[in-house]
Amino acid sequence: MNNKILTTKDITWKIVPSGDSCLVIEIQSALVGASSHWAAGAAAALRHASLPGITDVVSTIVTVGVHYRPEVLRRLGSQGETSYQAATRIVATVLNTFEYNNLAPPRVVQIPVSYGGDHGPDLETVASECGLSAQALIDLHTGADVSVQMLGFAPGHPYIGTFDERLAPPRRAQPRTSVPIGSVGLANRQSVIYPFNLPGGWNLIGRTPLKLFDPDRNPACLLQAGDRIRFVSITADEFETSGDGR
Amino acid sequence: MTIQVLKPGLLSTFQDLGRTGFQHQGIPVSGVMDERSHRLACMLVGNSPFEATLEVTLIGPTLQFDCPAVIAVCGADLGATIAGNPLPLARPVAVSAGDVVSFGKRANGLRAYIAVAGGYVLQTVMGSTSTYVRGGFGGACGRQLQKGDSIAFRNIKRTPSLDRRSSTFPEEIQRTQDSPIRIVPGREWDGFEPDARRAMAEQVFRISPSSDRMGYRLEGEALHLIQPLELQSEAVSFGTVQVPPDGQPIVLMADRQTTGGYPRIANVAAVDLPRLAQGMAGERIQFEWITLEEAQRLIVEQSQIFEMMGTGHGID
């Protein structure tokens, strides 16, 4: 996202149902990067409000999902209001008073990555697909101003973007059955980092020694939606010695 | 106060009402597949519904108790016995020191829930004892029960009475296992062909053998979109019915991922998730559209029935 100051008039939203226990805030914005930034801030504000009966608030790139318990919302609702109507009313109250411009500046997190070789087996192929040398791809990946757009798919698994338009290779035609923990994937101007050994279809360009998820750590997840990311290139030797000490 | 696991059964994991509040970090909720049976089992032994039960699947475990206890088994009839005698379902049952609880031939359903008065002693991770096997945490060592495991349980604070308690629901709430599963329109409902929306409620689906706690895969006539949809991933729920490009729906269940990007034709009504969770691979199921208002009315009503059952029975 650019450093341009955003105002709430750049964002419009509406609330729609998603089953009987979840509602979705749909966000519209003409500015690239603004919707996921607003979504992460709005979700944090909703969580901070500790609304009764609301169990989870999940921000993604263009929506915020709000999970709720219908029986609790029904109790809070006024006469004749359904659980969904009560939930909508309560969520809208928070969104209407949410000061987007007062959001604290995002945390900046450095992610060391050993690019290429055994740690990034797809680097060379992907670079040539993008019409770049391996080094030029690394330079674009480490030089970019990017954000954690959302966490999803697995515990602590971030979707990071949006990268330079040259970094837009498609996902692999044949997904791998097991991708090593810490692998950094690239596709369609986004990156992911695998928090465990998981199956996956992203192009693997490198690997970080940082632990993205550790249930014994507090907080368990290294990253959160809205964080600003700076990838930093390290050597394979540094990868071996710079393990996540936490 | 321990239970020795003589045989682990096919898939036995400790589950509670789930690990809520962390989905924005990509952490699945997990929790029980059949919440109604779980809550009933907890209530019958005088536990809070937030205590864990042992969710056992198809082939139940063989468990030996080293001291007296009160247990309740609810949900599927998997041929439970105690000390060699049939163990009545959905009732508090006294267990003597040395007694063995085991399971035999399945009569109906897929998942049974075993509650012990006082509650099991388990690993709490992020406020929940639910086992998330893929992540390797929660419950007992983050995995399914194994032979030789020894599970501790707490002292009974209040001896639950062994009277027969009301443990039934009106037909409107808990319909027969073979009646249609109620659904409400999903986020992309109007992106599907009218034939697909009709087929969703008219055709018979078969539960695929590749169904598990993460999702139920259904096989039937393919459901098609009017035109392809490019969606950004967003929050998904227990009961979200996603339709991948092959047109075969997947219903997301307790161990579902937190976000998904496939078009969603429907959501299973919360009141009927327990019945779907009792459906076995190979079985046939049908759906029936209801409105969001109706789905919410039913789940609110079920919650009121649970409150009434709890009154005067040590549940607060």
Image: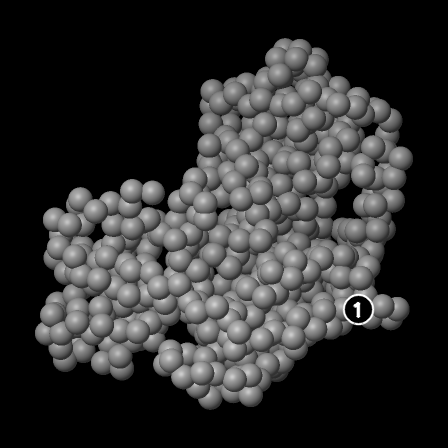
Q: Nearer the viewer, residue A80 or A149?
A: A149
At 56% across and 27% down in the image, what residue appears?
Answer: B61
Where B151 sits versus B272, above or below?
above
Question: Quick check: B115 left or right of A222?
Answer: right
Where B2 sits versus B186, above or below?
above
- Where's the C terminus of chain A, which quadrant? top left
Question: Quick check: A24 left or right of B294?
Answer: left
- Where's the N terminus of chain A, which quadrant? bottom left
At 22% across and 58% down in the image, what residue appears?
Answer: A113
Question: Quick check: B177 left or right of A112?
Answer: right
Tell me residue B114's x, y (percent).
66, 32
Residue type indicated by callout 1: Thr
Tell me residue A170's x, y (percent).
28, 74
Q: Quadrant of residue B90?
A: top right
Q: Quadrant of residue B157?
A: top right
At 22% across and 68% down in the image, what residue appears?
Answer: A142
At 42% across and 43% down in the image, what residue appears?
Answer: A217
Q: Which residue is mark 1?
A: A82
Q: Secondary structure at mark 1?
A: loop
